[in-house]
């Protein structure tokens, strides 16, 4: 049986990682839904759960084929471990925050792909970006000004994250439970 891949996308500061973490906690103990840690060429911290790696280590891992998917954004390299492909092949639903730039590549990697788009107002995004402390006001403005690289790509679920984290997290967790249930249905 084949599982599937749920790509959570949206602009910087929309709250993707927070919404994913809420859904992960809500689905703990619900087998079949996997939330892999990304490898990122950025030090730990800033509210994002990731495995920090150096540029050299990332390049070596990429050359060895240690990643199921890689991309570059904001001057950083991002990767999902090759175990993601194994989990999907084993029938699990893998959920990850990915760049909108990779959406067209996903169907070539996974037979079943769903897209969840998280959005929020520019004002809230800018405040969140500044609050996490990785960019100054100019860097935050540049992230907010970045055009959507996949503006017309369809989404299976859109979460407008201007309410509570619980509301957004419940929307994602409910969607993931339905996707997993649909895969298990005869």
Image: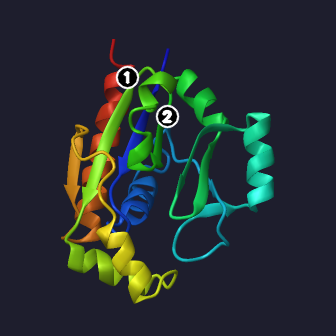
Q: Position of residue 121 (x, y in %)?
A: 19, 71
Residue 90 visible, this angle: no
- Place residue 182 in its image quadrant: top left
Which of the two residues, 159 or 174, is positioned nearer the viewer here? 159
Q: In the drawing, does residue 7 fall left or right of residue 172?
A: right
Residue 69 visible, this angle: yes
Determine whether 75 is above or below 179 in the image. below
- Place residue 176 in its image quadrant: top left
> Which type of secondary structure does the marked residue at label 2 adopt?
loop
Seen at 72% across and 41% down, the residue is: 62
Determine whether 29 is above or below 132 in the image. above
Which residue is the site of mark 2?
Answer: 32
Q: Which mark is residue 101?
A: none
Q: In the drawing, does residue 80 fall left or right of residue 109?
A: right
Q: Position of residue 15 (x, y in %)?
A: 35, 66
Which residue is the site of mark 1?
Answer: 183
Which of the two residues, 82 or 42, is positioned nearer the viewer here? 42
Graded by Cα atoms within 10 Å as few (under 14), some (14 to 19) or many (20 or more), the crowding at tag 1 reads: some
Q: Are marks 2 and 1 in contact (CB under 8 Å)?
A: yes
Seen at 40% across and 85% down, the residue is: 138
Q: In the drawing, does residue 76 fall left or right of residue 180?
A: right
Determine whether 155 is above or below 172 in the image. above
Which of the two residues, 143 or 129, is positioned nearer the viewer here? 143
Q: How many marks?
A: 2
Graded by Cα atoms within 10 Å as few (under 14), some (14 to 19) or many (20 or more), the crowding at tag 2 reads: many
Determine whether 70 is above or below 68 in the image. below
């Amino acid at each position: 049986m084949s599982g599937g891949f749920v790509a959570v996308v949206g602009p910087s500061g929309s709250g993707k990682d927070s919404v994913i973490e809420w859904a992960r906690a809500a689905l703990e103990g619900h087998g079949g839904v996997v939330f892999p840690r990304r490898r990122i060429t950025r030090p730990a911290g800033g509210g994002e759960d990731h495995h920090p790696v150096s540029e050299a280590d990332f390049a070596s891992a990429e050359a060895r084929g240690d990643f199921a998917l890689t991309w570059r954004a904001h001057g950083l390299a991002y990767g999902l471990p090759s175990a993601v492909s194994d989990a999907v092949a084993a029938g699990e639903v893998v959920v990850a925050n990915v760049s909108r730039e990779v959406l067209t590549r996903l169907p070539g990697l996974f037979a079943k792909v769903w897209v969840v788009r998280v959005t929020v107002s520019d004002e809230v995004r800018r405040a969140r970006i500044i609050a996490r402390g990785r960019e100054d006001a100019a860097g935050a403005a540049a992230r907010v000004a970045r055009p959507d690289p996949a503006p017309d790509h369809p989404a299976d679920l859109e979460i407008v994250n201007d309410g509570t984290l619980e509301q957004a997290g419940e929307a994602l967790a409910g969607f993931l439970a339905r996707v997993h249930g649909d895969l298990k249905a005869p």
